[in-house]
């Protein structure tokens, strides 16, 4: 039987560090909403973020009030209903933080929160990380030149082989490439990388409860190249990688036409799709599971999940943000850990 989220986290769950993400976005709001909800209230969660910003969000009265318990170490946390434990990573100038705007200090805070959480996970003080969304422009404005969480965490943990997984109950996607230009993707696509990601897909699915994973590999070109009519990457690169992994005992299919394989996965023919590039995997996943999708980084030395959406600056600090994906990502991190 495959992995299913329980409705409520148990007291014995592993400890999850939740990072604030960009404080000018919806991250603080969806964290508070998630942890104030009945399913996660009292769960073993430690928030890493700016305490003053969390207090500003609470002052908007968007959720029932919770006690923000300031701690210096994870061991000081009180895991009980109505209490949100916070390790303070203060903004340089919290009074000047403006919601919904790109700001270098916000990007720097997002970076520091992830770095602190990774250090705690590597030290064994927390057992998984759930990240709220950061803003890449703000991150770069602060001098942290990473395309996103995935690459940042890989750098912080010295992880060489890693991949982004998008996860819903019915559709799961893992990516060969993510945050690179489409032209660069075509120039750098390799058989070895595809083989690595197929192997990571099989390992991940077995870890979350699939005893015999079925993995589909999307093609690069329309109709998976139509036997070379629309491109030969499937013939020269993708198909040989699939055959090599079949020889290792992995139940993998393809190259599959990208315009149908995601629907086939959702309908139950496959358990996961290997997408070749960012939008090929993100568009169907976000269309079918925008509010409950979870982003997972496979290949790290610890579990990392994330809400599968951005900072939503247009509704930041208005109380309109939906916290479903953030709450699911926290629960999934607990159970995977």
Image (cartoon, helix red, strand yellow):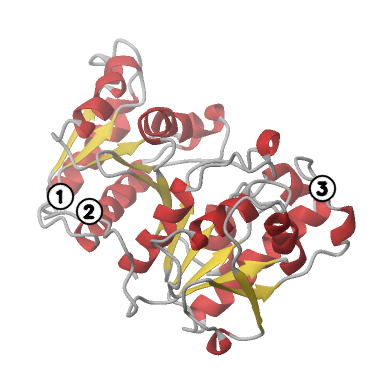
Residue 221 point in image, percent of width and height: 36, 20
Q: Earlier in the sequence, mark 2 or mark 3?
A: 3
Mark nearer the viewer, 1 or 3: 3
Residue ID for mark 1: 213
Quote the CA–CA distance across marks 2 and 1.
6 Å
**Labels 2 & 1 near each other (Cβ < 8 A):** yes
Residue 18 point in image, percent of width and height: 54, 65
Quote the CA–CA distance across marks 1 and 3.
43 Å
**Labels 2 & 3 near each other (Cβ < 8 A):** no
Quote the CA–CA distance across marks 2 and 3.
40 Å
Residue 41 point in image, percent of width and height: 45, 67
Residue ID for mark 2: 202
Residue found 48% across the figure and 52% down from its top: 326
Residue 223 versus residue 327 in the image, above or below: above
Which of these two is toward me, 178 or 238? Answer: 178
Residue 196 point in image, percent of width and height: 32, 52
The quadrant of the rendering that contains the C terminus is bottom left
Residue found 66% across the figure and 53% down from its top: 61
**Callout 2: SS:** helix
Residue found 29% across the figure and 27% down from its top: 234
Q: Earlier in the sequence, mark 2 or mark 1?
A: 2
Residue ID for mark 3: 103
> Which class describes the residues within 10 Å of circle 3: few (<14), some (14-19), or many (20+)?
many
**Callout 3: SS:** loop
- The image's mark for residue 229 is none
- Residue 200 lies in quadrant: bottom left
Question: Which residue in the rendered view is the most extreme toward the bottom?
Answer: 75
> Which class describes the residues within 10 Å of circle 2: few (<14), some (14-19), or many (20+)?
many
């Amino acid at each position: 039987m495959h992995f299913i989220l329980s409705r409520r986290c148990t007291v014995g769950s592993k400890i999850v560090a939740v990072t604030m993400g960009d404080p000018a976005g919806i991250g603080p709001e969806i964290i508070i909403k998630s942890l104030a909800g009945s399913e996660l209230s009292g769960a073993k969660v430690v928030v890493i973020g700016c305490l003053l910003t969390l207090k500003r969000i609470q002052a908007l009265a968007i959720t029932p009030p919770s006690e923000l318990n300031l701690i210096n170490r994870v061991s000081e946390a009180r895991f009980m209903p109505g209490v949100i434990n916070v390790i303070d990573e203060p903004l340089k100038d919290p009074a000047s933080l403006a919601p919904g705007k790109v700001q270098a200090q916000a990007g720097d805070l997002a970076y520091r929160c992830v770095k602190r959480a990774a250090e705690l996970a590597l030290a064994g003080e927390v057992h998984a990380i759930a990240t709220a969304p950061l803003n890449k422009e703000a991150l770069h404005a602060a001098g942290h030149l990473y395309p996103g969480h995935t690459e940042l965490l890989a750098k912080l943990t010295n992880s060489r082989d890693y991949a982004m997984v998008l996860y819903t109950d019915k559709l799961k996607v893992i990516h060969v490439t993510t945050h690179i230009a489409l032209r660069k993707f075509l120039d750098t696509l390799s058989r070895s990388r595809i083989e690595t990601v197929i192997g990571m897909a099989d390992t991940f699915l077995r870890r979350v409860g699939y005893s015999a994973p079925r993995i589909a590999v999307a093609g690069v070109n329309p109709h998976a190249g139509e036997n070379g009519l629309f491109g030969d990457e499937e013939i020269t690169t993708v198909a040989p990688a699939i055959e090599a992994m079949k020889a290792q005992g992995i139940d993998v299919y393809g190259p599959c036409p990208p315009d149908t394989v995601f629907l086939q996965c959702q309908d139950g023919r496959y358990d996961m799709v290997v997408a070749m590039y960012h939008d090929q995997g993100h568009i169907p996943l976000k269309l079918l599971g925008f509010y409950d999708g979870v982003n997972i980084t496979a290949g790290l030395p610890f579990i990392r999940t994330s809400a599968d959406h951005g900072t939503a600056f247009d509704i930041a600090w208005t109380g309109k943000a939906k916290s479903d994906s953030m709450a699911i990502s926290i629960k999934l991190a607990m159970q995977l850990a």
